Image (tube, rainbow, N blue to C red):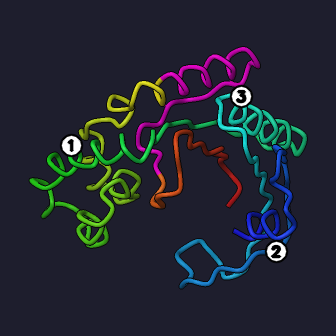
Amino acid sequence: AGVVRALIEHGALRGQTPRLYYMGPMFRHERPQRGRYRQLHQLGVEFFGIAGASADAEIIALSARLLASAGIPAQLQLNSLGTPESRAGYREILLAYLRPHAQQLCNDCQERLERNPLRVLDCKIASCQEIARGAPQLLQHLDPESAAHFVALQELLQAMDIAYTINPRLVRGLDYYHRTVFEWVADGLG
């Protein structure tokens, strides 16, 4: 949000497609969760005005180079959330699957069920993970443009020899996420 405010305030978006990065200490406003501290250090990369799969591939390639140069072996996990419209259709399909299992979900997932059912897919509780494994996959319910975007991204990653695993349970709970979501998973970092 701070980057967007700075770009708007300084008129930096007019006719440009800026690529920006930031790094340094950040602070969480909300109550810290297990494994998350009030202060953290973050490196972020933001692209503006570039919506294609090539922008996603560029950011993933940059992150791959950063991890490799730091000597951190990591595995790339990849998914697509599609557009808000395709997610809305999928939400109804997911709810139809999850509601009969509601009593078997953990307390957090029971609370999330109606408000944000996609969050049930990435719960770390074993009983919820078992239910999530049987859920319909969002990738099967993408709109045609999002599906083409995801195929193009995979082709670009393959052309750059960046290995990845598709993780259909990799989701985000915030509505501003569109299409590509990815995570680098590294064991042994603590």
Q: Secondary structure at mark 1?
A: helix
Mark 2, residues whose alpha carbon is within 10 Å: few (<14), some, or many (≥20)?
Answer: few
Query: In the picture provided, is 27 more to the left or to the right than 185?
Result: right
Query: In the picture provided, is 73 more to the left or to the right than 38?
Result: right
Q: Which of the labelled discs sits on residue 93, or is there none? A: 1
The label nearer to you, 3 versus 2, is 3
Whether 171 is drawn above or below 52: the answer is below
- Quickly name the residue at label 2: 25
Give residue 77's quadrant in the image. top right
Query: In the picture provided, is 100 more to the left or to the right than 66?
Result: left
Residue at x 65% of width, y 37% of height:
51
Mark 3, residues whose alpha carbon is within 10 Å: few (<14), some, or many (≥20)?
Answer: some
Residue at x 29% of width, y 42% of height:
90
The label nearer to you, 2 versus 1, is 1
Q: Secondary structure at mark 2?
A: strand
Q: How many marks?
A: 3
Amino acid identity at mark 3? Ser
